Amino acid sequence: FRHIDTAGQPKHYNEAGVGIGWAQAAKQLGLKREDIWIQTKYSSLDAQDVSKGIPYDVNASLTDRVRQSVDKSLENLNTVYIDSLIMHGPENNWEDTILVWKTLEALMDEGKVRQIGVSNMPDFESLEYLYDQARIKPAVVQQRFHQDSGYDTKIRSFCTEKNIEYQSFWTLGSNQHLITNDWFRNNAAEKGMSAECLMYVFALTIGITPLDGTKDDGHMREDLEVVRRMKSGETIISSEEVAHISELLGISGSSSEKDVAAETSSLTKEINDDGTKLTLDSETITNIESPHSNIHLTYGTAWKGVNTAELVYRAVCAGFRHIDTAGQPKHYNEAGVGIGWAQAAKQLGLKREDIWIQTKYSSLDAQDVSKGIPYDVNASLTDRVRQSVDKSLENLNTVYIDSLIMHGPENNWEDTILVWKTLEALMDEGKVRQIGVSNMPDFESLEYLYDQARIKPAVVQQRFHQDSGYDTKIRSFCTEKNIEYQSFWTLGSNQHLITNDWFRNNAAEKGMSAECLMYVFALTIGITPLDGTKDDGHMREDLEVVRRMKSGETIISSEEVAHISELLGFPTN
């Protein structure tokens, strides 16, 4: 890899780690600074998290914030210039957005930055307006490549016309409906590559530069090998295959998915602590689980936007009885959840108590003003929690919440305990049936909160991934205290297992997808995974294994559990 992407956003990225990594590799390989292309981003205050650090003075003027962020990036990245600097997203208004862009232009004039670009543009019109206002035009547009945005057909066409590089992130995680498609998998196998690698080939073929966040050396080699082949002039995917893949993805107006100069193709190594997120695609079903069952999957509703109501409706019709959401409009559509479950319940003749609904109070640091905040930001902390819960009750069409989670600790223990005491009071008042926590940074934090709590947490919801050591101590504590441990990004954070040949073969022998087997493994070791699939077939498959496990069937042996744990990288101690 010679292209690296990062950001001045400590809540998701470690710029200093990027600086150390590239410099060490360059020293070992005898590379010069100009041999490595480094891209970073200025992230607005709304996109930062005070508890993780902010690379500028929040009280400074907007221009100074941008400059301070870039100076910090230069320091972190061990460099005197940045190859590509991206505005991580528009500001809350056009006046500020244009001011940020003018500051990026000035930084280019001063030689600190070689090119500038934009990311997370909400629509084509926004990009077109910025382009028209810009003195120095954007050289790159970085977007999430997914179905909900129509795969940015107009934006990508504009980028082609204006010679702007279009970069994609979450290229794999947002397109699991393609990567798990039988035709696509078989096509990849015929070409001697993984389905994930073929997805990158498709992106490169239609003129996209994907961010590649793999942690696996084998996948790095595989991905870079197809770049080498394409640069040599080899056509890996035919125009007919491009058209069919576009159709499978759901890309409209596929005339733009044709001719691309492969010799300019490159993969960008994503240095990003986010992991990958799972979203899939469509149909409808029946295979029912009880809302009071210990073995169950919880339907996850993050990042489903305007499709939330329809997807929740289909999930409940499919048999899901547990639903997870949050009072955080930047990532969740609570009102859509409320519409979806109520419509499904009416059609199926279900009562409110047949559906288990979990939502979250999200702190101010986790909100985005431009997307709306479910409370008065000037209210006291206690009132913010109460206003958030009242809004959740209204959104969710309910008079009580089955499970209310503190979405993460506050910036200090005093405030964290105050939020918890407010959750306890809401339980006392009958608005909430149980309370829990999410995103605990370590075992000691959970243990301290538990010791301080009058009403103990009934659930702990965490990202289940290698970087946290798979929460071994936290999960052991949850088992000991009879706390439900829920996992999110269970698939996206563990692609090194899901793409493992042994694991895939084992899943095939059991008559299921590797993704489904991952859920079986999680359930077997006492985890309740959040399942965010949009695909009715996957809903059926996932709920069927729950039914089998509830009937007493052992799908994974103790030996297989041990081997899968080893493949995942569970701590040996």
Image (tube, rainbow, N blue to C red):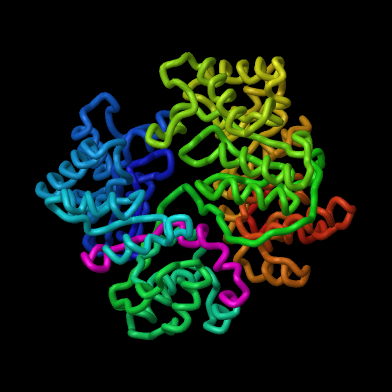
Q: Is residue 162 magenta?
A: yes
Residue 65, located in which quarter of the rendered image?
top left
The magenta segment is 159-185
243 left or right of 73? right
Residue 383 vs 401, above or below: the answer is: above
Which residue is located at x 16 percent, y 48 percent?
133
Residue extending furthest right?
552
Q: Is residue 178 magenta?
A: yes
Q: Please identify the quadrant where the C terminus is shown.
A: top right
Residue 337 vs 227, above or below: the answer is: above
Residue extending furthest left?
109
Residue 209, located in which quarter of the rendered image?
bottom left
Residue 460 vs 180, above or below: the answer is: above
Residue 241 vs 324, above or below: the answer is: below
Along the line of sight, which residue is nearer the eye, 302 or 393? 393
200 left or right of 182? left
Q: Please identify the quadrant where the N terminus is shown.
A: bottom left
> What is the total number of numbered labels drawn onto the structure image?
0
User: How far across and down, in percent of the image, does residue 308 sit?
Assistant: 57, 47
Do we see residue 444 in this rendering? no
User: How far across and down, in percent of the image, does residue 405 sit?
Assistant: 62, 30
Which residue is located at x 89 percent, y 53 percent?
551
User: How far across and down, in percent of the image, does residue 444 sit?
Assistant: 61, 28
